[in-house]
Amino acid sequence: MAIEIGKLRNVGVVGHGGVGKTSLVESLLFTAGGLTRLGKIDDGTTTTDFDPDEIKRKISINTAVAYGDWKGHRVNLVDTPGYGDFIADARAALRVVEAAVVVVDAVAGVQVQTEKVWKYASEYELPRAIVVNRLDRERADFFRTLDSLTRRLKGRIVPLHVPVGEEAGFKGYVDLAKMKAFVYADGKSSETEIPADVADRAREWREKLVEAAAETDDDLLAKYLEEGALDEPSMLKALKSGIGRGTIVPVLCACATKTIGSHPLLDMIVQEFPSPAERGEIVGTDVKARQAATRAIEAKAPAVALVFKTLQDPHIGKLSLFRVMSGTVKADTTLLNPARGAKERMGHIAWLQGKTQKAVADLGPGEIGVAQKLKETQTGDTLCEEAQPFELPRIVFPESAISFAIQPKSRGDEDKISNALARIAEEDPTVHHHFDPETKQLLISGVGNLHVEMTVERMKRKYNVDVTLLPPRIPYKETVKGRAEGQGKYKKQTGGRGQYGDTWLRVEPLTRGGGFEFVDDIFGGAVPRNFIPSVEKGVRDCMKKGILAGYPIVDMKVTLYDGSYHDVDSSDMAFQIAASMGLQKVFMDAHPVLLEPVMNVEVTTPAEHAGDVIGDLNSRRGRIVGMEPAGETAVVRASAPMAEMLTYEPSLRSMTGGRGAYSMEFSHYEEVPSFIADKVVKEAKTEKERAEKH
Ligand SMILES: Nc1nc2c(ncn2[C@@H]2O[C@H](COP(=O)(O)OP(=O)(O)OP(=O)(O)O)[C@@H](O)[C@H]2O)c(=O)[nH]1
Ligand SMILES: [Mg+2]
């Protein structure tokens, strides 16, 4: 039996890396009675960090789902990674929940990824609560953390709790709505008198909570201003609706490892957060009619589900985590994936408790589940009933910012590498790879350095292929700035049949992007008609290989204006060689230069670091094209050579204390300054000599 929609809560647990999200999920599951013992990160025994990589590194890498039943409700908890390189998972997870729990550390307060997940939650207009966790740590400070929350995050943020006890002595909280204290001992919570040392603070913050509740409604606010107080039922009602609609963001206290603060959080989730029924309708595309359409969220409606995560289970194979958006998904039925035109067998479907599956017969609207071994479906795809195809907007993943070239450690591993990367990309849509024919390298791109390094580790562990990471080769090009002309003659007439080809070539620059132009300017048959294509081929082959430093030649016009031939010894091959010899000489006389790719770069940085960011871009031969201060953050736009940007990520991170971000795309080719070109040419020569020796 599917879970009744009104009794369902889907909650995304998000926040900066290492603040205790996975531990909090564990604590909530334990408190709800679904676990026999409380797992620990340090022992590798939590429900939602089950991947060997997660256990080894003690960080979450993938989204995981688990559930607990609390006061007659089903609470699905979606635990997401907080490390920057994996934050795309948090964004995808927030697409399939009705509310977010944003966890922050009581020492560090708001951090880079806190701001990011906050933006994601705002993008989906999710109501949310903030949990100040790790209040038992040394130097933990609830009020300093609160200050960083209200300064750096948008929203009406007000405490629902104030802590009882500090640091190692942290033991509970005062509930400011009920004005009651709750203290924990041995994992059990009991109600007590409000301790004298927090009584004043509790009264002071209670007043602010009442004020926030009053502000949710004009009539209520008028009443509050007039009477200086609100009656209890109106206040609680206003608070509930404010939290449910996201106009009030409550702040709660917690120590996940001691389960402190889990009861009130579960209460809040079931009492204040919305159920999937409150989403209204779902919006998407009617695939048959090819137009925007909506669907009611009802058990009897045609099934529509969104796949938000793909995992590879070592025993089962591919797992697709999905959320039923409308209708009912039944086991042993077939659904359509309209984006891939594929029918998918929903053989076995289940609820997820971390890695453990609980098989079910059907999943109703709003439920989250898993399907096994779908053939073509990938993260972000919609599954729907075949008769009424419907597609949801895709989940958008961030562009990859950094690329490396990969080289197999053993010969002949190329196929294995491509296979492994294709499988990994199914799990992680932020990993991309492609073969660059210009540099003849296999490139792998990801969100950041750690991300790419972990992908390589995963290739080794799961698919048994070992590779070396190299910085990618820059795809330089060659061209000329001047005009020159001269002869290319190939003559071999000693013994047997001879070879004879003679060409006179002129080279001239074309405008940037002009490509290649070949002009036949022969009069009177100095080069016979049938050998003209041979000359052109000789020129083209030579241009592909490059002359200056082995990079392809572009934006150049070559004119064949004279030559001579021999009745017997001239041949296709002889004219090709003559043309190539001629071009090599004439090209070097025509002021050859190197061109390099230039990127458009956009950097987002806290305003106080904008000066450093600009200075650093200048030192990378960058040109600043714009700068917009946007409050506390600034956006700097620049164009800079690709060669200088390969090492940008670590520098930006250290310059901005990890708070800067950037994106980059190819813009155009530009001439390399001569002092750098000389170096590139020299390197190319030594590389060529080395290659010839081997
Ligand atoms: N002292 C203390 N330590 C905690 C608390 N909650 C979590 N930790 C510890 O903090 C570390 C990180 O906890 P996780 O639960 O992995 O944090 P996370 O936010 O899930 O981390 P990522 O998923 O990697 O972003 C672990 O060593 C936990 O044992 C807490 O309330 N108090
Ligand atoms: Mg985690």
Image (cartoon, rainbow, N blue to C red):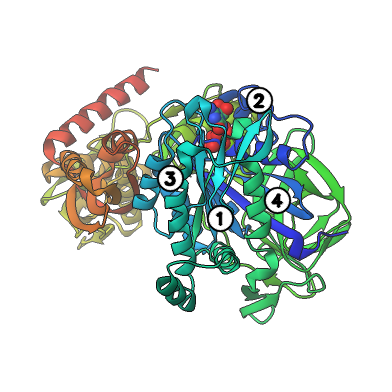
Q: Which residue is mark 2?
A: 44
Say which mark, if any, is on residue 546.
none
Dot 4 and dot 3 residues touching (CB under 8 Å):
no
In the picture, which quadrant includes the N terminus?
bottom right
Residue 264 in sight here: yes
Distance (Cα) linking label 3 and label 2:
39 Å
* Ligand number 1: quarter of image: top right
In the picture, which quadrant includes the C terminus?
top left
| Front disc: 4 or 1 | 1
N-terminal of the pair, mark 4 or mark 3, is 4
| Front disc: 2 or 1 | 1
453 relative to 109, above or below: above
Q: Helix or strand or loop: what does disc 2 sit on?
A: loop
Q: Residue at x 76, y 39 (%)?
A: 317
Q: Which residue is mark 1?
A: 177
The amino acid marked with disc number 4 is Asn
Distance (Cα) linking label 4 and label 1:
26 Å
Q: Which residue is mark 3?
A: 201
Image quadrant of residue 302?
Answer: bottom right
Mark 1 crowd level (few <14, some 14–19, many ≥20, 10 Å Cα): some
N-terminal of the pair, mark 4 or mark 1, is 4
Instruction: Name the residue nearer the viewer: 239 or 182.
Output: 182
Q: Which residue is mark 4?
A: 76
Where residue 580 sits: x, y (%)? 27, 42
Dot 1 and dot 3 residues touching (CB under 8 Å):
no
User: Which residue occupies the extreme top position in the image?
Assistant: 693
Distance (Cα) linking label 4 and label 2:
22 Å
